[in-house]
Image (cartoon, helix red, strand yellow):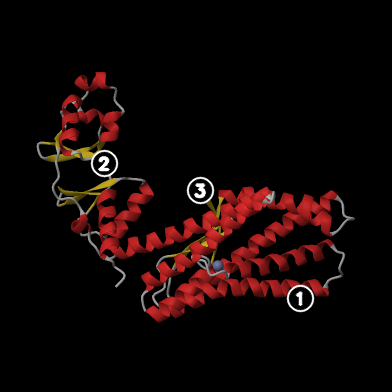
């Protein structure tokens, strides 16, 4: 889910909407206009129902945005930069540049979001009490009161990475004085909630509440995935934090000449079992040839094609310096969807860093236990 577009900037934070949100916008407005509001109030015209549906959906959007802004402003006040807020299908994500360094900070950042939703719910409820009961606006405000209470309460479920799970992590972190281990426990609790939701979903399917059952299974699975992903990301960052590229790159680099025929190139792949070879001419780096590129050429053409014709030329490759931070390089590789980068110092090739090298380091950290 990478496709997002920017809709504005509030206090230096870019506000983005994921394309998936547009679909939900339409679905939500439709459901409200055709199913929800006609049951709540019987005597309005379709135009009024549709206006109510669209306005309510926009206000739900504003509510979710305020919830995320509250997290963001608290984070900024604690010195953690926030680059952007992205609004997805189910709520939003405020992108923190780094994790909080203290459990107290995490607690405040996590709690202020649900608190904002609950306060918005109370305000909406207050406004509803002041309005005459049968206006279209009264029904809109009543719905906003409900949805903000629901958002506030659901986010307080202690399932990491929901806000409540972050509150739980902050608590465990405070007692154990170890963030990684606290995250693991919070993710385990989150997974229990996720599996409970999935089990409930299957139970509902057997009780013939098919659609609700599928929703519970889907949301449970999403929650489980999100928990695992945030734990892995944390381990990743911890393992690679402060590690320079030269420490994990493969320094023994086998190169192949530019004019090598593909029928000979295949022998190199068989012999060394690398996924790629840097290509050189008189010792100068010219490009990189991968196994994938070789495989794309039909075998009958291997005798008449040279490596130079299928390789990626140097100017199109990502090159990094041996002293660069491995985390930084990893982010760059992920963003460009590259499996490996060439490490260059003083115009000389000194190594190759592949995704496999990083994964090995991370699994070593996991086996030896970084959770000291
Ligand atoms: Zn939140």
Give me the residue at 29% from left, 55% from top.
329
Closer to the eye: label 1 or 2: 1
Which residue is more in the foreground, 232 or 290? 232
Q: Could you tell me which secondary element the residue under label 2 belongs to?
A: helix
Q: Give how far across and how far down residue 50 sits, in percent.
A: 78, 51
Residue named by callout 3 = 3
Closer to the eye: label 3 or 2: 3
Label 1, ligand 1: CB separation under 8 Å: no
Task: State ligand 1's quadrant.
Answer: bottom right
Q: Earlier in the sequence, mark 3 or mark 2?
A: 3
Please rate how many residues cluster around mark 3, counting C-alpha atoms within 10 Å: few if below 14, some from 14 to 19, many from 20. few
Q: Give how far across and how far down residue 17 sits, in percent.
A: 56, 54
Residue named by callout 1 = 126
Q: Could you tell me which secondary element the residue under label 3 belongs to?
A: loop
Which residue is more in the foreground, 65 or 225? 225
Q: Could you tell me which secondary element the residue under label 1 belongs to?
A: helix
Q: Is residue 303 above or below residue 244?
A: above
Numbered tag placed on residue 315 in the rendering: 2
The answer to which image quadrant residue 238 occupies is: bottom left
């Amino acid at each position: 889910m990478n496709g997002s577009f920017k809709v504005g900037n509030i206090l230096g934070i870019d506000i983005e909407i994921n394309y998936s949100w547009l679909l939900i916008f339409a679905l939500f407005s439709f459901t409200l206009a055709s199913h929800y509001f006609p049951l709540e109030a019987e005597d309005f015209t379709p135009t009024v129902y549709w206006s109510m549906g669209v306005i309510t959906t926009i206000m739900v959007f504003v509510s979710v945005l305020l919830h995320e802004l509250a997290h963001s402003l608290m984070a900024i006040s604690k010195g953690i930069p926030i680059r952007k807020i992205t609004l997805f299908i189910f709520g939003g994500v405020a992108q923190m540049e780094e994790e909080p360094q203290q459990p107290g900070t995490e607690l405040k950042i996590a709690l202020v979001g649900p608190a904002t939703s609950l306060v918005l719910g109370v305000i909406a409820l207050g406004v509803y009490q002041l309005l005459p009961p049968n206006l279209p606006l009264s029904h809109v405000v009543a719905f906003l009161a409900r949805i903000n209470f629901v958002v506030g309460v659901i986010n307080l479920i202690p399932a990491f990475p929901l806000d409540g799970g972050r509150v739980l992590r902050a608590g465990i972190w405070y007692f154990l004085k170890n963030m990684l281990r606290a995250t693991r426990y919070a993710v385990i609790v989150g997974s229990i909630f996720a599996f409970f939701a999935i089990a409930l979903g299957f139970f509902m399917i057997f009780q013939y509440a098919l659609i609700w059952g599928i929703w519970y299974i889907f949301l449970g699975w999403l929650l489980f995935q999100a928990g695992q992903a945030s734990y892995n990301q944390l381990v990743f960052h911890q393992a690679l934090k402060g590690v320079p590229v030269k420490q994990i790159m493969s320094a023994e680099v086998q190169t192949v000449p530019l004019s090598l025929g593909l029928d000979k190139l295949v022998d190199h792949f068989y012999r060394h079992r690398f996924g790629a070879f840097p290509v050189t001419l008189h010792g100068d780096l010219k490009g990189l040839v991968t196994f994938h590129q070789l495989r794309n050429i039909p075998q009958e053409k291997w005798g008449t094609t040279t490596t130079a014709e299928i390789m990626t030329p140097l100017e199109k490759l990502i090159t990094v310096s041996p002293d660069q931070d491995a985390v930084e390089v990893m982010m760059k590789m992920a963003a460009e969807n590259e499996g490996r980068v060439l490490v260059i110092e003083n115009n000389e090739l000194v190594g190759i860093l592949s995704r496999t090298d990083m994964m090995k380091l991370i699994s070593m950290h996991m086996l030896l236990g970084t959770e000291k």
